[in-house]
Amino acid sequence: MNLNRVKIVFAIAALLILFGIFAYFNNVPDPYIDEGLAPPAIEAGASGNQYPALKIENTLYINVKSGVIKIQLLPDVAPQHVKRIKTFATQGFYDGVVFHRVIDGFMAQTGDPDGTGRGGSDLPDLKAEFTQKYGFERGVIGMARARSDDSANSQFFIMLNEAPHLNGGYTIFGRVVDGMNAVDNIAKGEPPAKPDKMIKMYLEP
């Protein structure tokens, strides 16, 4: 047997061995499927939130200079915060309030009638309603707070991008379902030189 034939034989043998290894590992049971186990949970906030169907009674609108922001409120995870937001919307509390802190690529914060980031309403602060059901992805709306978990009052923020580090540390009470282009066009700054404002907030008519 000449050298070339030896090389061919070894090459064929190597290919057969590689094929056998591939076939073996390709047939190893997938523990998430073959054993009936659930796949690993999607990381909270990794654009994997599964929301309930939108209902009229949980639909909120905010008119801003650049358009209309349509919001789905989420009482399934934050009933007391949703109740507070509905109360403020009905009272006209937010009408004319500026976006006092808008960080490009992060979030747009508003809800302080003083426009400084240090104010709130005369109502008592709310107890935290943190959740692991939803994460802070683009369009999610959370309540701002001070150092205490139970210090949310009237200020809130709309996410311009995903921020998993906020998950479980701030109450999520809603999400934008239409009008993110309007949110993206809100004047940026801390504070903005010429801040945009909520012209009007109102519930589904």
Image: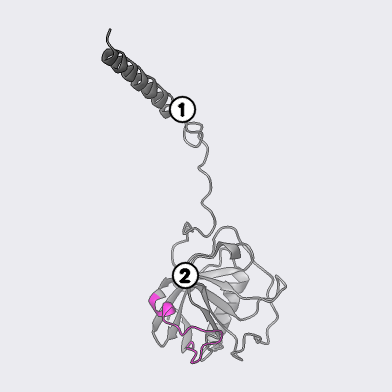
Question: Which residue occupies the foreground of this view, 80 or 14?
Answer: 14
Q: How far apart are marks 2 and 1 (CA)?
A: 41 Å
Q: Does the magenta stretch include residue 26?
A: no
- Main SS of the magenta part reads loop
Report the residue at 70% width, 81% height from top. Answer: 124
Given residues 152 and 53, the one toward you in this image is: 152
Q: How crowded is mark 1: few (under 14 residues within 10 Å), some or many (20 or more)?
A: few
* SS for callout 2: loop
Residue 131 rendering spot, x and y as whole percentages: 61, 61
Sequence-wise, the earlier of marks 2 and 1 is 1
Which residue matches tag 1?
28
Element marked by disc 1: loop
* Amino acid type indicated by mark 2: Gly
Q: Position of residue 146 (x, y in %)?
A: 69, 76
Span colored in magenta: 181-198
Residue pointed to by mark 2:
139
Residue drawn 42% across the image and 76% down it: 70
Query: In which image quadrant can residue 133 be found?
Result: bottom right
| Mark toward the viewer: 2 or 1 | 1
Amino acid type of the residue tagged 1 in the rendering = Val
- The answer to whether any part of residue 153 appears in the image is yes
Res 66 → quadrant: bottom left
Q: Looking at the rendering, in which quadrant would you find the C terminus? A: bottom left
Q: Residue furthest right?
A: 148
**Residue 172: mark:** none
Tell me if 182 is positioned left or right of 107 in this view: left
- The percent coordinates of residue 84 (x first, y second) are 60, 78
